[in-house]
Amino acid sequence: MKVFEFSLFGNPVSWNRPARGRHGKRYDSQKSLKEQIQLYIQANCITPIVPPKNTPVQAEITFCFLPPASMSKKKRDSLIGTLKFTKPDLDNLEKFLYDTVEKIYFYNDSQVAEHTTRKVYSNTVRTDVKIIIGGKTTWHE
């Protein structure tokens, strides 16, 4: 079992649908952003030499957002550490992150067999990621 933990600082990004070009051809409008994050991860985080193909992966992800600036300071301070239940959607945040770390920590995002994700208010905008490769392989009812 191998555990990899890292934080990506900056606003969490949600997944966008592939866009259509002038001639109807689809393209990934977030490709350059994904490549920038991949380069950052490979340069600054511990990564496996080769992503495993037939190994289950567990993920624990926390997306941290700033409280709205329109609120009073007292109200913003009271929101720190609480769950955020407004946009962006949690599943779109997950999709973008999984697409970004694919081929670095796992071969395909279908290997993610178990995950815990949350959106919280924090003083620092960031995404905290913990990836466990080859953890438990059984489940009991």
Image (cartoon, rainbow, N blue to C red):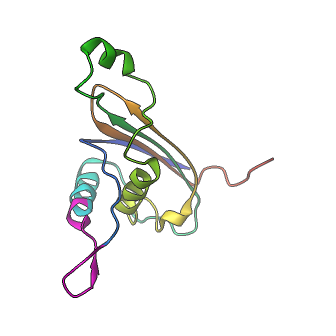
Instruction: Return the residue found at the far right.
Output: 141
- The quadrant in which residue 47 appears is bottom left
Q: Residue at x 79, y 48 (%)?
A: 140
> Residue 31 lies in magenta, yes or no?
yes
Q: Residue at x 39, y 66 (%)?
A: 103
First to last magenta residue range: 19-33
Residue 28, horizontal then vertical, whole percent: 28, 71
On screen, residue 36 versus residue 105, left or right, reads left
On screen, residue 89 versus residue 70, left or right, reads right
> Residue 98 lies in magenta, yes or no?
no
- The quadrant in which residue 64 appears is top left
On screen, residue 96 versus residue 106, left or right, reads left
Residue 31, horizontal then vertical, whole percent: 25, 67
Residue 110, horizontal then vertical, whole percent: 54, 65
Residue 1, horizontal then vertical, whole percent: 56, 50
On screen, residue 36 versus residue 12, left or right, reads left
Camera-side residue of 21 and 6: 21
Instruction: Return the residue found at the far front.
Output: 70
Camera-side residue of 63 and 40: 63
Is residue 124 positioned above or below 77 on the image? below
Is residue 56 positioned above or below 132 on the image? below
Q: Residue at x 25, y 55 (%)?
A: 37
Camera-side residue of 51 and 10: 10
Instruction: Return the residue found at the far top.
Output: 74
Camera-side residue of 4 and 92: 92
Q: In the rendered picture of this protein, how many numbered marks are placed on residues?
A: 0
Q: Residue at x 33, y 27 (%)?
A: 122
